[in-house]
Image: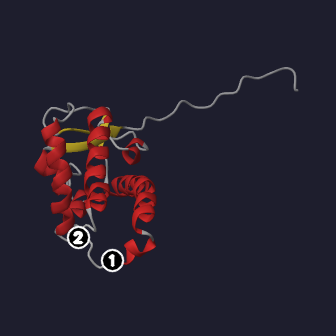
Amino acid sequence: MNESLKYVGFWKRVIASLVDAALIGLIIFPLLIGEYGFDYFESDEIFQPLGPFDFILNWIVPFIIYMLFWNYYQSTPGKMIFKAKIVDSKTGDKPSIEQFVIRYFSYIISLLLLFLGYIWVAFDKRKQGFHDKLAKTVVVQPKILEPEPVIFSESSEEE
């Protein structure tokens, strides 16, 4: 057990996911609007791409973004806010590309099961969602140590 790390809990992971979704949205939405106009968002077909451009932007681009961030930083911008990293659940080392791919596609399983795969983070002792369990990963962050007390040196002159 690493005494300097702790598992990242549910609410921090929710915030991290919202930040990541917003950042990806900032990239994707303007391109979708440019290609399809605002009518794009009125479509009833959530999982039915309107064409190759739609499929690439909504399915391929997020996958590439996540894989790059996970591979190079073991994190995403949202997780970086909390200094959180994704690590192998057995060794604490960087997960393999295969684990990252399993983790990414397991998000879909977590989502389709009425978000239970994500909510499970709140109840699991290692704070693992279904995607973490399937990929054999955990999300950790450094424990916050108490800061040094503030000490002002006394000065004989006031400015």
Q: Which tag, 2 or 1, sits closer to the chain's start?
A: 1
Q: Position of residue 112 (x, y in %)?
A: 18, 68
Residue bearing the label numbered 2: 48
Q: Position of residue 58 (x, y in %)?
A: 30, 59
Tell me if residue 69 comes above or below residue 51 in the rendering.
above
Q: Inspect this view and state whether residue 34 appears.
A: yes
Q: Splitting the image into 4 quarters, where does residue 109 fall? A: bottom left
Q: Is residue 130 left or right of residue 57?
A: left
Tell me if residue 103 comes above or below residue 98 in the rendering.
below
Q: Residue at x 16, y 35 (%)?
A: 96
Q: Position of residue 97 (x, y in %)?
A: 17, 37
Task: Tell me the tag on residue 43.
Answer: 1
Q: Splitting the image into 4 quarters, where does residue 153 fall? A: top right
Question: Residues at badges 2 and 1 in contact (C-beta under 8 Å)?
Answer: yes
State the SS at label 2: loop
Q: Position of residue 85 (x, y in %)?
A: 30, 39
Q: Nearer the viewer, residue 12 or 146?
A: 12
User: Looking at the picture, which amino acid does disc 1 mark?
Assistant: Ser
